[in-house]
Image (cartoon, rainbow, N blue to C red):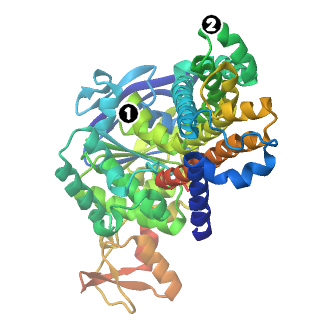
Amino acid sequence: MRPGLILRAALVALLLALVLSPEAFTPVFAPFAPENGPVIYTRSSLLSLSLSHLGLVAVASLAATVVAVTLAILVTRPAGTAFRPLSRTITNVGQTFPPVAVLALAVPALGFGAGPTLVALFLYGLLPIFENAMTGLSTLPAATMEAARGIGLGRWQRLWRVELPLAMPVILGGIRLSVVIALGTATIGSTVAARTLGEVIIAGLLTSNTAFVLQGGLIVGLFAVLIHDALGQLEKYLTRRSGRR
Amino acid sequence: MIEIDRITKLYGSTRAVDAVSLTAETGTITVLVGTSGSGKTTLLRMINRLVEPTSGEVRINGEPTHAVKPHLLRRRIGYAIQGHGLFPHHTVARNIGAVPELLGWPRDKIAARVDELLELFGMDPAEFRDRLPLELSGGQQQRVGVARALASRPDLLLMDEPFGALDPIIRTRAQEDLRAIQRKLGSTILLVTHDMDEAIRLGDRIAVMDGGKLVQYGPPEEIVAKPATPFVADMVGDAERPMRLLSLIPVSELAEPGPAEGPALPEDASLREALSACLWSGREAIPVETVGAPAGRVTLAAIRARAERHG
C-alpha cells in the first residue's frame, strides 16, 4: 500500500507540473526539439487544453454510460430479451467503426469542433459499458433475486435496491475501460478542430518537433493511468461494499 | 387458516400440480414432502403467487389471494428459501428490516423489531446487527433469513427447503429452534422438504405429494403407521418405520410406577431415545423424571409392545 501511495502522489505531482508550468521542463525536452525551434508548446495554455480534453471525455462517457446502462437494463427485463441480439449488434458496430471514419462522416453534418469528436467518443464508448452492464445484471445470485421477489419488492424496487447495486462493480469496470479508450481517442479530435491535448501532438508531428509530441503524449498518458487507477480503486471499494467477496 | 382449493398448474400439457386441496390450521406447521418434480415447490410458490395457478384458488383467513396485487400479497407472507437469499450488500439489520421498511414502519419500530428477532434467534444484536451476510456462518445466515421472513409478523410463513444447505448437526439445531420459535409466536408455517425425517420432526401435519397430486395428508403418526400408497410407504421407509413411530411418542405415555437403574430421561423425551438408551446400556427399564423429580420408569417390554401396535 505504502509504495503504491508514494508512486501515485509522484505521478500526480509530475502531471500537475507538466500542465501548470511546462517551461520548467525546457531542459528535459530540449534535446528532442529541432535546432532553434520552440521546445515548449505555448500556442495555447496546456491547462485549458487539458480541461477541454477531460470535459469532452467526461461528457461523451457520461452519455455512453446512460445509454448503454439503460439499454442493458431494458434487454435484461423479461420483455426485452428478444432485443438482446439486436442491441449487441448495434453496440458492436459502434466499436468496429474506426473513430477517424466517424469523424470524417460527422464533420459534414455537425461541422468542425467538438461535435464530431463527441459523437465518435460516444459511439466508441458504448460497447464495453453495455457488455459489462449486461454481464453484471444477468449474473446476479439466484437465491437473492428469488428472495427479493418473494418478500414483495416491486420491479423497480428490485432494480434500484438489489440489481444495480450488486451489478455496480462490474458496470464500473466497463466505464473504466471506456473512459481510458476515450482519453486516448480524443486526441484525434484535434484533426477536426476540437480543443484537446491532441493539438500539441499534431503540432509536433506537422513541424517534426518530437518535444511537442512527447509533451502531449506524456500528459494524456498520465491522465489515463491516474484515472484508470482511481476508477479501479473505486471499483474495489464498491465490490467490498456489495459483500460478494 | 390457509385453504388451498383445487389448485392446478399446467406447464404445456404437464400437470405440475393437479387439483390439490388442503387446509392448514392457524398456528400449525404443515410440511409438504415429496421427491423432486413432485410439485411441492410449485404448490408453495402458488401461495404467494411467484407462480400463477392455472386454476383453483388459495384463501388466507378467508380472503382469496388473487384479490391482492402480487407484491403486496408477498409483503404479508413470510418467505424463507434454501441458501437464505440474503441481500449481500445490506447489513443484517437492513436484511431483517426489509419487509417492515417496505410496509412503511417508523424507523425506531423497525430497529426494535430487528433487535427482538436477533435475540430470539440467539444472536447478540450489538454484535451482529451491523455485519454483512458474508461475515456470518452458514447457520447464522440461515437464521437471519428466517428472521427476515418473520419480521413483519406475517399471517403465514412459507419455507422452501430452508435447511437444505446446512450440515446435519446445524440442521438439527435449526429445526429445533424453528419448532420452539413457532410454538412461542404461534406462527402458521408451510414448509417444503424432500426429507421425511425433517417432515416428521417438524410437522403437525404432513402432506405427501407425488406426480403433482396430494397422495396423503395427515398427522405424522398416521403417515408413518398407515401409508396410503406404496409411494408414501417408500418415503417413510420400511426399515425406519418402527423408529420413526417411536420418535413421535413421548415416554410419558408409557411411564409406569416402579424402580429403574441408571441415568434418567425427561418425560418429554421420545420412546426412540428411551429404546436407544436401553439398547446401549443393556438395561430393561429407564427411569423417567419430571423437572428433576422421579416419575416412574419406562420398560423395554412396554416400548416393544407399543411399537407392535402400529399407531
Return the chain for callout 1: A
The quadrant of the image that shows the N terminus of chain A is bottom right
Q: Identify the residue at horizontal 46%, vertical 24% (top origin).
A: B8
Residue B272 drawn above or below residue A57:
below
Q: For residue A80, what is the image quadrant?
A: top right
Q: Amino acid at mark 1?
A: Gln
Q: Secondary structure at mark 1?
A: helix
Which of the pair B138/A187 is nearer the observer? A187
Q: Amino acid at mark 2?
A: Ala
Residue B272 drawn above or below residue A239:
below
Left or right of B304 in this view: B110: left
Which of the pair A199/B75 is nearer the observer? A199
Residue A157's label in the rendered image is: 1
Identity of the residue furthest to the front in this view: A36
Q: Secondary structure at mark 2?
A: helix
Tell me whether marks 2 and 1 sit on the same chain: yes
Q: Identify the residue at horizontal 45%, vertical 53% (top origin).
A: B199
* Residues packed near mark 1 inside 10 Å, few (<14), some (14 to 19) or many (20 plus): some
* Residue at which label 2 appears: A109
Residue A220's label in the rendered image is: none
Left or right of A25 in this view: B50: left
